Image (cartoon, grey):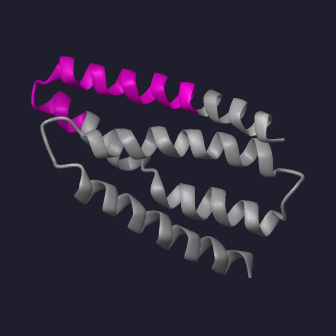
Amino acid sequence: MRFIWVGVGGAVGSMLRYGVGLWLSTTRFPWSTLSVNIVGSFALGVLLTYALGRWSTTITTSLAVGVIGGFTTFSTFAWESFTMTQAGEISRAAVYLTLSLVGGVLAALAGYAAGRALG
């Protein structure tokens, strides 16, 4: 049954990601992908710090792997980084890579701190 709940969560997360993409207009910089990955890193930090040991494995996995996994997108981040470099936009790609990687780790750290504060 956990497998089904992960799938349902993934559908919800993917729809949320698509909604963010519609909400944030497409420009020459991939703000929607950056946003969902930063928010997802924070959310996963909060969830795993707070929920592990408190919530059932089914609920935690459905939210972490399903919803947050469906919401975030490494493959789009990789493709956007690649296409920027292919287009000769090396500076833009470097900014995107730095913001994504450093921002994601800092967001996970902030999520961890928030999860500890909740617990």
Relative to 91, residue 19 above or below: below
Q: Nearer the viewer, residue 79 or 44?
A: 44
Q: Extreme right residue here? A: 53
The span picked out in magenta is 82-107
Identity of the residue drawn at 19% across and 38% down: 83
Left/right placement of residue 79 relative to residue 101 reads left
Relative to 54, residue 12 above or below: below
Left/right placement of residue 26 relative to residue 36 reads left
Identity of the residue drawn at 55% across and 40% down: 41
Location of residue 115 by image quarter: top right
Q: Extreme left residue here? A: 87
Identity of the residue drawn at 13% across and 41% down: 27
Location of residue 9 by image quarter: bottom right
Q: Is the magenta stretch mostly helix, strand or loop?
A: helix
Q: Nearer the viewer, residue 63 or 88?
A: 63
- Quarter of the picture containing the C terminus is top right
Residue 11: image location, x then y, percent: 48, 72
Magenta highlight on residue 17: no
Location of residue 66 by image quarter: bottom right
Q: Which of 34 and 88 is in front in this view?
A: 34
Relative to 44, residue 104 above or below: above
Residue 4: image location, x then y, percent: 64, 80
Identity of the residue drawn at 54% across and 56% down: 69
- Quarter of the picture containing the N terminus is bottom right
Residue 21: image location, x then y, percent: 27, 55
Magenta highlight on residue 103: yes
